[in-house]
Image (spheres, helix red, strand yellow):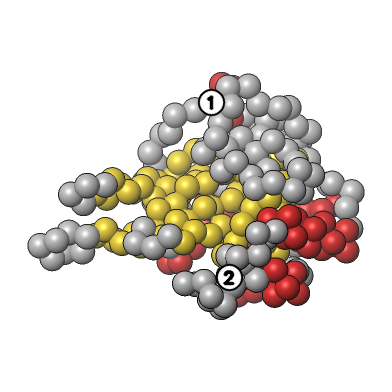
């Protein structure tokens, strides 16, 4: 699925550049300076004062749409991001990301007497460095203890999807260095040896299974597939976790 998303993402953004967004525009609560471009930001964990980043474009991210469903006990929310570059909505990017969320992480309420809500809650974070903007989607499955992340990287100049190696250039890191660092991160994260299969996870460290991105603080992050151990309830499956490469810790979103 990871490889499939990357293929679709590159093709769609490059070829269907005139597509339009299909979600309603709900204006979100903004951070100071309106999450402006020379800053980095996160819809999930927005500091009152953000760290200035070197960006040649003014960038902000708002809610493109927010869907709220509830059952007898709980309210569930799914949110799609809207990227704005130099005061203009990046329509082709927003349309692609919105459709991807709706198709891959739907949230629905049953029409029977019970009115159960099932599917995924989604939220997002974003970061900017130089001419790279990253949007990270966090999806949590409602009826099971399962969550995953998706990363989308775009060039602010061309508005096209970026190859993974292109993201690394603004951090001065090579592919091999990122792979080695990711393996070290996995060793630290899976040190308890119970929930995840460390060997299988490390063996999967390549650009089909990991994606670099810019964190909300402007640091290098990596989203990587970590495989569950054979005795886990999700045996054979992988979940995607997002880490700050420098600290080797899970990102705070």
- x and y percentages locating residue 247 in the rendered image: 76, 43
Q: Nearer the viewer, residue 242 or 20?
A: 242
Q: Quadrant of residue 222?
A: bottom right
Q: Nearer the viewer, residue 250 or 21?
A: 250
Q: Which residue is mark 1?
A: 31
Please name the residue shown 88% across and 53% down the image: 173
Identify the mark at residue 101; answer none if there is no mark.
Answer: none
Q: Which residue is mark 2?
A: 228
| Gap between marks 1 and 2 measured at Cα | 37 Å
Q: Nearer the viewer, mark 1 or mark 2?
A: 2
Please say whether residue 209 is visible from this viewpoint: no
Q: Quadrant of residue 218?
A: top right
Please name the residue shown 60% across and 65% down the image: 194
Q: Nearer the viewer, residue 22 or 70?
A: 70
Query: Label 1 crowding class (10 Å Cα cut-off): few <14, some 14-19, many 20+?
Result: some
Please name the residue shown 69% across and 46% down the image: 249
Query: Label 2 crowding class (10 Å Cα cut-off): few <14, some 14-19, many 20+?
Result: many
Query: Does 252 sit above or below residue 207?
Result: above
For the N terminus, give its image quadrant: bottom right
Badge 1 marks a residue whose secondary structure is: loop
For the C terminus, give its image quadrant: top right
Query: Does 11 sit above or below residue 34?
Result: below
On the picture, is 114 further left or further right than 33? left
- x and y percentages locating residue 217 in the rendered image: 69, 36
């Amino acid at each position: 699925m990871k490889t499939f998303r990357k293929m679709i993402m590159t093709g769609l953004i490059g070829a269907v550049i005139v597509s339009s967004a299909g979600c309603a525009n709900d204006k979100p609560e903004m951070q100071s300076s309106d999450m402006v471009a020379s800053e980095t930001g996160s819809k999930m964990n927005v500091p009152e004062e953000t760290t200035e980043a070197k960006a040649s474009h003014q960038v902000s991210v708002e809610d493109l749409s927010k869907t709220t469903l509830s059952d007898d006990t709980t309210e569930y929310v799914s949110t799609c991001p809207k990227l704005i570059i130099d005061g203009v909505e990046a329509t082709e990017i927003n349309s692609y990301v919105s459709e991807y969320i709706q198709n891959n992480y739907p949230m629905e309420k049953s029409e029977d007497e019970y009115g159960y809500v099932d599917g995924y809650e989604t939220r997002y974070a974003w970061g900017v460095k130089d001419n790279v903007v990253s949007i990270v989607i966090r999806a949590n499955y409602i009826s099971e203890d399962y969550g995953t992340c998706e990363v989308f990287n775009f060039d602010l100049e061309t508005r096209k999807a970026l190859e993974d190696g292109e993201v690394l250039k603004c951090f001065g890191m090579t592919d091999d260095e990122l792979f080695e660092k990711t393996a070290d991160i996995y060793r630290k994260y899976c040190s308890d040896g119970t929930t995840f299969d460390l060997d299988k996870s490390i063996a999967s460290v390549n650009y089909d299974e990991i994606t670099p991105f810019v964190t909300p603080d402007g640091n290098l992050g990596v989203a990587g597939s970590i495989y569950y151990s054979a005795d886990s309830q999700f045996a054979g499956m992988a979940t995607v976790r997002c880490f700050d490469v420098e600290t080797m810790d899970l990102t705070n979103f």
